[in-house]
């Protein structure tokens, strides 16, 4: 036998018997279900127009709602901080990694959120994991919206608490879940503020009422609301004008254009998390560059409310232009066009890409149903919004699910 053939046979035989062979089969399943994902690089700075696979395209797939991720002032702040403090934080905040800059950012966040204090984590995902795991344990109860972000679900699992998932936004189910409250030590209602794959809001005032009535904590993830919702851009609490204490979580990586996460709330909550949140205690402090960029973003948020106004102007324009398509209910810059199958979402997204429009095809398991997810930015022009609307309406004629009515049913 040819030596090369022999080598190939041996390799195949080895692959059949390794403990990793199942992965090939699992990947195969993902491909067949049209669930397989891969990455595609973006060249240059983020913005309403980006270069992808060598082509310029209109960007409706970014979380950079205010267009700050490519803002030269954030870059200048990051460069200045790097020059002064270096690139790495060198250790956890409790050891060598703590800088005045971190506390300044935490002060800025607390001021923005109207809370007594705040704590900055290395990502929003870690903020959610650590906060939930620290505040709840095996003797406790978590009531969680079924559409919660992966990080909230992972945090609930990590905590060891009993988790009751209630159907999306269903207050009657929350009430029913609270019926078991007495059997547990502590309880928390955990929800996204703006649901990341749908764009609708949690019923915050009603959830707060229930939480207060049942001696439960309320944890709201404002990742997509911070900088976006409310008169000052403070998020869901600002939008609903609630002033009672609750625990607000979020990220520095969306409207704030940087990287990192935070928790804002009453001072004892923050003090406790500094002692007990494992994803804060045992991880390296946020880099000086990310910290300084986030501070610059919060200053711009305050100084330039016109950015937020422009964002909402664009959202309204898109809403009007697509009013006869079956969009999912949304009160945020996230707008989703309902489609029936994952492959339809993929084909539609590919067709849009050919037309120079970058929009995300969202499929299970990220969301329960397939859709095109569009996110509007303050830096989109009216021409950008118009171009998107024309392509969507045209394409929808081909991708319209046969079993859905032509117009959106009234909710
Ligand atoms: C993006 C996101 C996070 C995670 O934030 P990162 O800073 O990107 O880790 C958490 N929750 C929600 C709802 C998000 O959309």
Image (cartoon, helix red, strand yellow):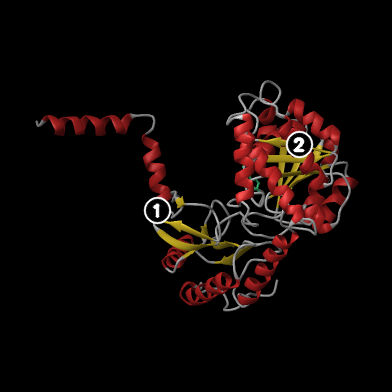
Q: From the viewer's side, name the closer residue of 115 and 279.
A: 115
Percent across and percent down for residue 122 are: 64, 35
- Residue indicated by mark 1: 32
Measured Cα–Cα span from mark 1 to mark 2: 50 Å
Q: Which residue is the extreme one toward the top?
A: 95
Residue at 53% x, 73% y: name it.
387
Q: Earlier in the sequence, mark 1 or mark 2?
A: 1
Residue 136 seen anywhere in this rendered image of the structure = no
Percent across and percent down for residue 174 are: 78, 51
Q: From the viewer's side, name the closer residue of 22 and 262.
A: 262
Q: Is residue 137 above or below residue 177?
A: above
Instruction: Find numbered disc 1 in the image and state the secondary structure of the residue it sits on.
Output: helix
| Mark 2 crowd level (few <14, some 14–19, many ≥20, 10 Å Cα) | some
Q: From the viewer's side, name the closer residue of 49 and 135.
A: 49
- Residue indicated by mark 2: 104
Instruction: Find numbered disc 2 in the image and state the secondary structure of the residue it sits on.
Output: helix
What is the quadrant of the C terminus in the image? Answer: bottom right
What is the quadrant of the N terminus in the image? Answer: top left
- Horizontal placement of 377 versus 139: left or right? left
| Mark 1 crowd level (few <14, some 14–19, many ≥20, 10 Å Cα) | few
State the count of labels.
2
Q: Which mark is residue 354?
A: none
Residues at marks 1 and 2 touching, judged by CB atoms closer than 8 Å: no
Asked whether mark 2 lies closer than 8 Å to ligand 1, one says no
Residue at 63% x, 38% y: name it.
80
Q: Is residue 377 above or below residue 95?
A: below
Question: Would you identify the image quadrant in which residue 283 lies?
Answer: top right
Residue at 77% x, 42% y: name it.
108
Percent across and percent down for residue 91 are: 63, 24
Q: Is residue 317 above or below residue 36?
A: below
Question: Would you identify the image quadrant in which residue 343 lies?
Answer: bottom left
Percent across and percent down for residue 172 are: 80, 56
């Amino acid at each position: 036998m040819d030596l090369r053939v022999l080598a190939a046979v041996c390799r195949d035989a080895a692959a059949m018997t390794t403990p990793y062979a199942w992965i090939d089969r699992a990947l195969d399943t993902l491909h067949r279900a049209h669930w397989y994902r891969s990455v595609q690089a973006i060249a240059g700075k983020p913005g309403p127009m980006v270069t992808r696979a060598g082509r310029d395209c209109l960007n409706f797939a970014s979380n950079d709602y205010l267009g700050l991720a490519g803002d030269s002032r954030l870059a200048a702040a990051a460069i200045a901080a790097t020059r002064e403090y270096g690139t790495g934080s060198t250790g956890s905040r409790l050891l060598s990694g703590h800088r005045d800059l971190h506390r300044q950012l935490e002060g800025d966040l607390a001021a923005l959120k109207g809370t007594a204090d705040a704590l900055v984590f290395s990502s929003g995902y870690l903020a959610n994991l650590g906060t939930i795991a620290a505040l709840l344990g095996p003797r406790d109860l978590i009531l969680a919206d079924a559409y919660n972000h992966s990080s909230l679900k992972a945090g609930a699992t990590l905590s060891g608490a009993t988790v009751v998932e209630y159907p999306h936004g269903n207050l009657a189910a929350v009430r029913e879940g609270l019926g078991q409250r007495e059997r547990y030590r502590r309880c928390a209602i955990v929800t996204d503020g703006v649901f990341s794959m749908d764009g609708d809001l949690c019923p915050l005032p009603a959830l707060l009422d229930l939480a207060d009535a049942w001696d439960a904590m309320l944890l709201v993830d404002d990742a997509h609301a911070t900088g976006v919702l409310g008169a000052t851009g403070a998020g869901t609490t600002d939008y609903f004008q609630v002033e009672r204490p609750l625990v607000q979580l979020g990220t520095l990586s969306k409207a704030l254009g940087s990287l990192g996460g935070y928790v804002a709330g009453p001072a004892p909550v923050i003090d406790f998390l500094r002692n007990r949140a494992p994803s804060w205690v045992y991880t390296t402090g946020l880099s000086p560059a990310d910290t300084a960029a986030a501070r610059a973003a919060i200053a711009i948020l305050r100084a330039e409310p016109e950015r937020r106004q422009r964002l909402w102007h664009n959202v309204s324009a898109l809403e009007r232009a697509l009013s006869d398509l079956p969009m999912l209910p949304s009160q945020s810059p996230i707008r989703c066009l309902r489609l029936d199958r994952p492959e339809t979402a993929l084909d539609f997204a590919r067709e849009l890409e050919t037309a120079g429009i970058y929009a995300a095809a969202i499929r299970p398991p990220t969301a329960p149903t397939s859709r095109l997810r569009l996110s509007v930015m303050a830096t989109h022009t009216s021409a950008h919004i118009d171009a998107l609307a024309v392509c969507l309406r045209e394409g929808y004629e081909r991708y319209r699910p046969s079993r859905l009515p032509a117009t959106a049913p009234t909710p």
